[in-house]
Image (cartoon, rainbow, N blue to C red):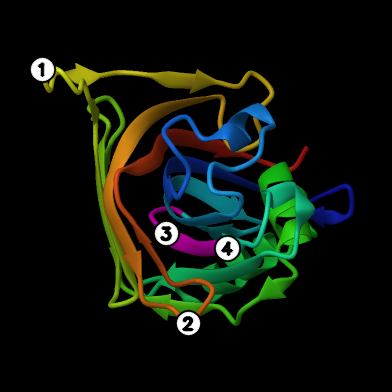
Amino acid sequence: MATNGSTDWRIKGEGVTSCNCAWGCPCQFNALPTQGFCEAVATWQIREGHFGDTSLDGVRYAWLLHWPGAIHEGDGHRQVIIDESASDEQRGALEALMTGEHGGAVFEIFASVCPHQRETITAPIEMASDREQRVASFKIGDIAQTRIESIKNPVDESEHRARIDLPQGFEYSIAEMGNTVEATSNAEEPLDLKLENTYAQLNEVDWAPE
């Protein structure tokens, strides 16, 4: 089945992202990144989905990302990693989505601002996420890993809950805010990163071509 000349698809699931910005991430408010540049690692677990006749149920994939300035200024680098358990058909479907040619704002936008696209690789991806508790972790083979916890009150160490609500957001509508306790990547520059006590978001995903 096709939509506007492209393959019909839909993805529902969970997303977890860690970046180098301060909690809240100015990018979510159309402001410049905390450190003047952006680097991030993000992982998704597809709960249910399809690309044409190919089921994407249960597939995991990740991105390593780097921009020398603000994301909207482009010139970004991206490494796509697909879980090694995905079939050839599922990997092909995800790679097709990443081009942005089949619609979906999140895929169109990231493809447009990441001209430096590395060849897709496969690796075992382990992911655990509890949005309600603002706790998550993932491990991408021997390439990258992250640990996220809830934000703590600096006075009494109690858990602090904050959310970002974007009614017209292309990544999410509501995201829980967390603290990236640590995140590392040993990928080749500029996709190597080491984060500590930085921004994290945990969000539900429901994407489809517009």
Q: Which residues are magenta?
A: 57-65
Q: Whole-Å distance between the Cαs marked 4 and 3? A: 24 Å
* Dot in front, 4 or 3: 4
Which tag, 4 or 1, sits closer to the chain's start? 4
Q: Residue 97's x, y, as percent? A: 67, 60
Label at residue 59: 3
Between tags 1 and 2, which lies in front? Answer: 1
Vertical position of residue 39 compared to residue 202: above or below? below
What is the number of the mark on residue 81?
none
Residue 88 drawn above or below residue 206: below
Q: Could you tell me the amino acid type at mark 1?
A: Asp
User: Could you tell which of marks 4 and 3 lies nearer the N-terminus?
Assistant: 3
Q: Residue at x 22, y 27 (%)?
A: 133
Asked whether, in this view, residue 52 is left or right of residue 89, the answer is: right
Residue that label 1 marks: 156
Q: Which residue is mark 4?
A: 66
In the shown orientation, is residue 25 left or right of residue 112? left
Amino acid type at image mark 2 = Glu
Which is in the foreground here, disc 4 or disc 1?
1
* Residue 123 appears in the figure: yes
Question: x%, y% of residue 90?
Answer: 52, 68
Residue at x 54%, y 69% (from the top left corner): 80
Residue matched to label 2: 188
